[in-house]
Image (cartoon, rainbow, N blue to C red):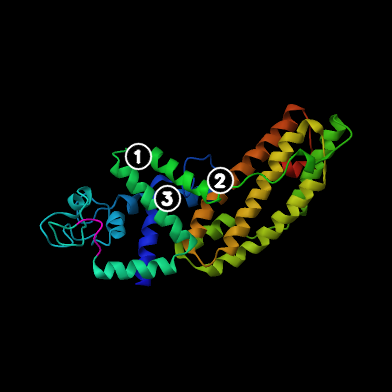
């Protein structure tokens, strides 16, 4: 029964999150080639999983799994009415009719539900809530398009606290005494030295997460530890350097984006007991990584607007052209 419950939660999480591309942020700008690989491969999988209707009865396979129906049998209970028609009519597709209803539960289903309730993880609870709200919307006649489901998922993720508030404000930043060309040059060199001091990584963390997403192999997760250590050191550097006042708002965004990426990596590293929670967190990580990329581009534009020039002998060159 535990394995069956695992399948149900899997169907809820993957079908509602992957269906709309929410999980892998497919509509965001490209961050790096490795992110693009993650996005494209996962969205290809999600589209085929979410749209599959093996028995052609009008219910997607993932919906049939949620009802405990057989995805390969258009009339699971053999009462002459298809599973899709029964669900639309408020009947139970696994209880023979004509007097059945969704309120009825077969004995095995009731026992399973009781066990499932006892074993439910936080992610399982999230999946059940997603499905319940999904069915309320669907039964109300709402058009279940990408926009509707995306809003549903994002709303629940916000309620669950997976979308966090920024940690830092301008009061946490060291503002320099000067705001001139020398200050800009010094600031850029500080950013560049931070990049130079970061230990080199043998591979991108997104490739590690890609392998985990493909295999579910939790032995991949300890490989995130060097990235976590690197982002911790980077964050401390960002908080300790002198920043020109004209760059303050950009630097605050840079710091918060770095902290967000660090937090998402730490959360994924700690969530090793729940594969689906990790996949939800991966969505947040890709969003955070895109935010960090955008903050770096904004700072590079800041230096370009002020015509600050760094040669390959200046540390600032690494920030402008090395990342």
Does 42 sit above or below residue 306? Answer: below
Secondary structure at numbered mark 3: helix
Q: Main secondary structure of the magenta part?
A: loop
Query: In the figure, 41 relative to 110: above or below?
Result: above
Which residue: 21% across, 62% down? Answer: 94
Work out whether residue 315 can be spotted: no
The earlier-in-sequence mark between 2 and 3 is 3
Name the residue at the left extreme.
Answer: 80
Does residue 221 show up?
Answer: yes
Residue at label 2? 287
Tell me if mark 1 has few (under 14), some (14-19) or many (20+) residues whose alpha carbon lies within 10 angstroms of its own.
few
**Residues shaded magenta:** 101-105
Residue visible at 27% across and 62% down? 68
Q: Is residue 154 left or right of 16 when viewed as pictured? A: right
x 40%, y 38%: residue: 147
Q: Position of residue 295 (x, y in %)?
A: 66, 39
- The residue singled out by tag 3 in the image is 17
Q: Nearer the viewer, residue 121 or 276?
A: 121
Left/right placement of residue 42 relative to residue 321 reads left
Point out residue 105 in the picture as x, y percentages from the top left corner: 25, 63
For the residues labelled 2 and 1, say whether their Cβ atoms are less than 8 Å apart: no
Task: Look at discs 2 and 3 and give the one toward the viewer.
Answer: 3
Q: Is residue 134 magenta?
A: no
- At mark 1, the secondary structure is loop
Cα gap from disc 1 to disc 3, whole angstroms: 13 Å
Asked if labels 3 and 2 touch by Cβ distance under 8 angstroms, the answer is: no
Q: Identify the image quadrant of residue 191.
A: top right
Residue identifier under label 1? 145
Dot 3 alpha-carbon crowd within 10 angstroms: few under 14, some 14 to 19, many 20 or more: many
Query: Where in the figure is residue 92, as x and y percent of width and height?
Result: 21, 57
- Camera-near label (2 vs 1) is 1
């Amino acid at each position: 029964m535990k394995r069956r419950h695992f399948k149900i939660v899997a169907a809820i999480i993957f079908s509602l999150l992957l269906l709309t591309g929410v999980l892998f942020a497919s509509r965001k700008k490209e961050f790096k080639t490795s992110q693009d690989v993650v996005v494209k491969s996962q969205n290809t999988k999600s589209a085929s999983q979410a749209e599959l209707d093996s028995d052609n009865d009008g219910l997607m396979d993932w919906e049939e799994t949620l009802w405990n129906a057989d995805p390969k049998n258009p009339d699971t209970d053999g009462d002459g009415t298809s599973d899709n028609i029964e669900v639309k009519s408020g009947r139970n597709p696994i209880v023979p009719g004509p007097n059945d209803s969704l309120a009825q539960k077969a004995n095995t289903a009731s026992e399973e539900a009781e066990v499932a309730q006892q074993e439910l993880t936080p992610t399982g609870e999230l999946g059940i809530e997603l499905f319940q709200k999904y069915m309320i919307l669907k039964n109300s006649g709402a058009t279940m398009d990408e926009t509707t489901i995306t809003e549903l998922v994002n709303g629940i993720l916000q309620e669950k606290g997976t979308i966090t508030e920024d940690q830092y404000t301008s009061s946490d930043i060291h503002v320099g005494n000067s705001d001139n060309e020398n200050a800009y040059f010094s600031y850029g060199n500080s950013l560049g030295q931070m990049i130079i001091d970061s230990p080199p990584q043998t591979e991108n963390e997104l490739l590690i997460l890609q392998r985990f997403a493909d295999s579910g192999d939790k032995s991949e997760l300890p490989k995130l530890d060097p990235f976590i250590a690197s982002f911790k050191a980077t964050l401390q550097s960002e908080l300790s350097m002198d920043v020109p006042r004209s760059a303050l708002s950009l630097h605050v965004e840079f710091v918060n984006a770095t902290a967000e990426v660090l937090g998402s990596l730490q959360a994924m590293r700690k969530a090793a007991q729940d594969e689906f929670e990790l996949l939800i967190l991966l969505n947040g990580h890709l969003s955070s990584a895109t935010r960090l990329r955008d903050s770096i581009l904004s700072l590079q534009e800041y230096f370009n607007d002020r015509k600050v020039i760094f040669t390959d002998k200046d540390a600032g060159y690494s920030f402008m052209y090395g990342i």
